[in-house]
Image (cartoon, rainbow, N blue to C red):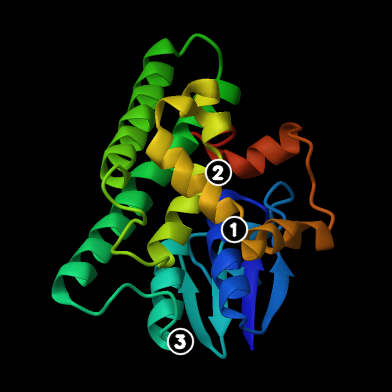
């Protein structure tokens, strides 16, 4: 059975969505990142990068949300785009775009808006601009496509959904500027599996306070100087 190391953050929710959609049996292993669980030796054996999500598939360790989606999609044959060179190329391109662009820039936009010291206007403006730019790229793509790749719902749409559902926190009401982006977000969010994926975190009590200890675990540079 798959051990799923998770919390309620955007990236674990992508994997949770796949597991619920595919009906795969899995064991939840909560990782409370505000308490530093991600840095415990037993978890670092699964993901040496110390981040969620990760899975242990009977001794096969996979980390990074989009890598896990690709692994599970290829293993099960479920929710994969049509197996043609063109669709595979599109799948890989958009999966990497989301992994290297949408997710990181959205995360940094939230960080500099909500957690960084005040007065860092350059950083705040840069990441807000990049978040908007990535949403615009996706919105333009979805203007001519119902789904991210081809005509069927796939792991690429799941990857999109993880951070797309956080858009109101990233850019506030500006999400209305991207109607095609919002259309797909709303469609995926309305799927029964999406509600189940989001509810998984409620099976456990995760720390919610962003106190000094929590911020130290979430943003280790705050207490660690690089020399």
| Residue 147 appears left or right of 137 | right
The quarter of the picture where the N terminus appears is bottom right
N-term-proximal mark, 1 vs 3: 1
Marks 2/3: CA distance? Answer: 26 Å
Q: Secondary structure at mark 3?
A: helix
| Res. 138 image quadrant | top left
Image quarter of the C terminus: top left
* Residue position for label 3: 76
Residue 42 in view here:
yes
> Which is nearer the eye, 208 or 95?
95
Q: Earlier in the sequence, mark 2 or mark 3?
A: 3
Q: CA distance from mark 2 to mark 1?
A: 10 Å
At x 47%, y 39%, the residue is 182
How crowded pointer 2 is (Cα within 10 Å; few <14, some 14-19, many 20+) is rated as some
Q: Which residue is mark 1?
A: 13
The spot of residue 136 in percent (x, y) is 31, 33
Q: Residue at x 84, y 55 (%)?
A: 205
Residue 165, numbered label: 2
**Gap in Å between the C-alphas at discs 1 and 3?**
19 Å
Residue visible at 41% across and 24% down in the picture = 128
Q: Are marks 2 and 1 in contact (CB under 8 Å)?
A: yes
Judge the density around disc 3: few (<14), some (14-19), many (≥20) Cα neighbours within 10 Å: few
Is any atom of residue 226 visible in this view? no
Q: Which mark is residue 92?
A: none
Q: Camera-side residue: 124 or 37? A: 124
- Image coords of residue 199 (percent x, y): 75, 58
Image point 37% across, 75% down: which residue?
80
Provide the secondary structure element on which disc 2 rests.
loop
């Amino acid at each position: 059975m798959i051990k799923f190391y998770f919390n309620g953050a955007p990236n674990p929710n992508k994997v949770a969505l796949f597991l619920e959609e595919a009906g795969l049996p899995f064991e939840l292993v909560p990782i409370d990142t505000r308490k530093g669980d991600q840095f415990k030796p037993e978890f670092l054996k699964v993901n040496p990068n110390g981040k969620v999500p990760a899975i242990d598939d009977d001794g096969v360790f996979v980390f990074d949300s989009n890598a896990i989606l690709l692994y599970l999609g290829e293993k099960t044959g479920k929710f994969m785009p049509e197996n043609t060179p063109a669709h595979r190329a599109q799948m890989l391109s958009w999966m990497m775009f989301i992994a290297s662009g949408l997710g990181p820039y959205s995360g940094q936009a939230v960080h500099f808006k909500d957690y960084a010291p005040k007065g860092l206007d350059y950083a705040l403006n840069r990441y807000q601009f990049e978040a908007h730019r990535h949403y615009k790229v996706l919105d333009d793509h979805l203007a001519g496509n119902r789904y991210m790749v081809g005509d069927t719902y796939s792991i690429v749409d799941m990857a999109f959904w993880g951070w797309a559902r956080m858009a109101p926190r990233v850019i506030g009401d500006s999400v209305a500027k991207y109607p095609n982006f919002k259309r797909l977000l709303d469609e995926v969010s309305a799927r029964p599996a999406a509600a189940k994926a989001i509810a998984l975190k409620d099976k456990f009590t995760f720390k919610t306070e962003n106190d000094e200890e929590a911020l130290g675990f979430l943003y280790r540079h705050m207490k660690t100087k690089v020399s």
